[in-house]
Amino acid sequence: MKNCLYWLFVALVLGRVAEGDADEPVVVWRQEVGVGFSSFVASEDSVYTSGHVGDDDVVYCLDANDGKIRWQFAYPEPLEARDFEGGPTATPALDGDRLYALSRSGKLFCLDATDGEVHWKLDVSEVADVRIPGWGFSGTPRIVDEKLLLTVGEAGLALDKIDGSLIWKSADRDAGYASPVLLPAAEGTLVVFASGRSYSAVDLQTGQPRWQERWLTTFGCNAADPIYRDGRLFLSSGYNRGSALFDVSGEEPELIWKSKDFQNQLHGSILHDGFLYGLDGDMEAGARLKCVDWKTGEVRWVENDLRPGAIILVEDEWILLTDTGEMIRGAATPDGYQETSRSKVLEGKCWVNPLYHGGRLYCRSVEGGVASVELRD
């Protein structure tokens, strides 16, 4: 009888634990990839990122299912820990069976995505004849048709994605740290590039400038990716620079609104159903999560009781990975802050955007810890 009661008790307790944990995220695997701020890009069953180990930067291909290293490619590169931990800051870009990896000093590699073999390599600062920005090249490369677009120089660089040959380049000014953004236009597609002093829209085919919006920021730190939607372009920077929305459907940008009440220092915001969700303020000072009306710039709500971090959109939810490794989920609604779950998934300093792919969230710390987290409804 005592044994029956004991096992009944165990079953009830375990049942409650299992039921209580049903909605909790499950860390499927962990891995180490070295120091850095590179996020992830994924194919069907592989995940790619970069880190710094010893005296080298290393590009990793991980098995998306179990985290095992399928291949790695190392090359000499200084850590360059200037006022931060250092390591690579650009996320690799994937195009079919080719992977493009950019170092902070400008080393660019076109690798075979299946085995890491080098198709070609070059130095973007030498090809474009431009200086290296203060914190190194950081924008993620973007592939459009045959062109590989990079945030290099004042208004970008375009290379042939197959052989790395130069298509067009821009003036020798400090590049910004954001990734290129495409703008459809009546005269042909434009590309917006960040520099340390402005945002420039250039013709995709020729690199010829169409317009330039002066955007001065302390340290030239224009790092948050612009957001384009339906003829409107949103720009935001930290260090008391603020945000602005422009009508870019004409020949020149026309200001719709500007505000210092919403400042994305390092991480871009997300846009969902007419509202922006993002971190306002500098990371070291404790940025706050805000919801802002896309059309007017009005702040709809503020949540002060959160650590700063990086935010992404998954369906109708925002997911925030805080700088202390907490994963927080909430409803993307202007009707107030509505948190749905919170769980610790990583140790260390987490300033890197997570990636959602195949039902899992791929997260990393600056120190190099990686976690693959299964999301549950």
Image: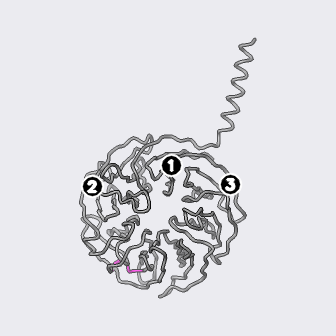
Q: Residue 339 has which mark?
A: 3
- Taking the spot 61% from the left edge, 76% from the top edge, the residue there is 260
Amino acid on which the number 2 mark rests in the picture: Pro
Q: In the picture shown, does residue 157 fall above or below 344?
A: below
Q: From the viewer's side, name the closer residue of 66 and 171.
A: 171
> Does residue 196 show up magenta in the picture?
no
Q: Which is more N-terminal, label 1 or label 3?
A: 3
Q: In the picture shown, does residue 255 fall above or below 349?
A: below
Q: From the viewer's side, name the closer residue of 54 and 355.
A: 54
C-alpha gap between disc 3 and disc 1 = 23 Å
Give the quadrant of residue 301: bottom right
C-alpha gap between disc 1 and disc 2 = 25 Å
| Tag 1 secondary structure | loop
The magenta segment: 201-206
Amino acid on which the number 3 mark rests in the picture: Glu
Within 10 angstroms of label 1, few (less than 14), some, or many (20 or more) residues? some
Within 10 angstroms of label 2, few (less than 14), some, or many (20 or more) residues? few
| Tag 3 secondary structure | strand
Q: Residue 76 has which mark?
A: 2
User: Which residue is disc 1 drawn over?
Assistant: 348
User: Which mark is in front, 3 or 2?
Assistant: 2
Q: From the viewer's side, name the closer residue of 39 and 147.
A: 39
C-alpha gap between disc 3 and disc 2 = 44 Å
> Does residue 203 show up magenta in the picture?
yes
Residue 35 image position (x, y, % from top left) = 40, 52
Query: Which image quarter is the N terminus in?
Result: top right
| Tag 2 secondary structure | strand
Left or right, 138 with reference to 365: left
Residue occupying the far top of the picture? 1
Q: Which is more N-terminal, label 2 or label 3?
A: 2
Amino acid on which the number 1 mark rests in the picture: Gly
Do residues under tags 3 and 1 come within 8 Å of each other at their CB atoms?
Answer: no
